[in-house]
Amino acid sequence: MMAVESDVQLEIEVLQSIYLEELQVDRKQDGGWEVSLVLHPSTGQDAVSQFVRLTLTLTLDPQYPCSSPVISIHNPRGLSDDKLSSVQTCLQLEAASCLGSPVLYQLIEKAKEILTDSNIPHGNCVICLYDFKEGEAFTKTSCYHYFHSHCLGRYVSHSEEELQQREKELEEDKTRERTEHQELTVVCPVCREALTYDLDLLLLSPAPQLPEFHGETFGSDFQRKWEGLQKILEKQRSKGGIIDPEVESNRFLIHINEVRAHSDVHASLLPGGKRLFVTF
């Protein structure tokens, strides 16, 4: 048993020499180990082309390597649920095929290989709620969330206006003591992490092409209901109601059909030349 434990410690020391401070190692109370590492696709030194990532955690019980590690994935970015399930299954099969032998390095490198093959973001822009299409400019934030660049520019512009108003309100609030400067920053609309951005560059990017809907697309029943809602809206407005579609659309950035001049768009092609992106 001591020989097995010594072998596991040696395997972990080898991993630490390879991955250095990126590798997190914890000794469990039952004598097992937990090894964790944030993984990115292999793109050489080009970090801006890394569109996906995940944190891989391998939990070893005292019987390892005669028992397989428990594999768990945390904080994935840019990966669909199907892809995550595929990664999990692939790693479990790899671990089962190597039962009785050291397998940690093999699992880590296998996960990196899958990320490299899947280095295209999945999902849609949460601001306009439409998918990324061929030729559209998008932005990857430092927190690995993706938006149409133009949508993000409108969001940032609106957020800056709100922050300026908030700062003004705080300065004018005489009943409130501000013992220290309260920093107000624009945050990611998904995870609320502070954003780094170039607003002018974002707004120069072309707006996404949204699908056009024509009257014949909707049935007569829907159109009747829509006309009825419009009458209610006009009644509320005439009585001083607070509903203002234009203001609300600007606030939540659903209205993004405005065309802006963009003679100099700084964007690059995704692998395969299918999409444009702006990265910070």
Image (spheres, rainbow, N blue to C red):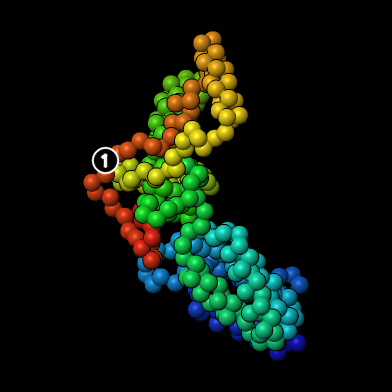
Residue 77 location (% of width, % of height) = 53, 58
Residue found at x 51% / y 57%: 122
Q: Nearer the viewer, residue 38 or 25?
A: 38
Q: Is residue 97 left or right of residue 192?
A: right
Q: Amino acid at mark 1?
A: Ala
Res. 77 in view: yes
Residue 99 location (% of width, % of height) = 69, 84
Q: Nearer the viewer, residue 152 or 280?
A: 152
Residue found at x 48% / y 22%: 244
Provide the residue designation for mark 1: 261
Res. 21 in view: no
Up-down relation of residue 31 to residue 201 (above or below): below
Up-down relation of residue 163 to residue 18 (above or below): above
Quarter occupied by residue 44:
bottom left
Q: Nearer the viewer, residue 14 or 228?
A: 228
Q: Is residue 168 left or right of residue 261?
A: right
Residue 144 location (% of width, % of height) = 48, 55
Residue found at x 73% / y 80%: 67
The mark total stands at 1
Residue found at x 55% / y 76%: 110
Q: Furthest-left residue in view?
A: 263
Near mark 1 (Cα within 10 A), the count class, few <14, some 14-19 or many ≥20, is: few
Q: Is residue 90 left or right of residue 68?
A: left
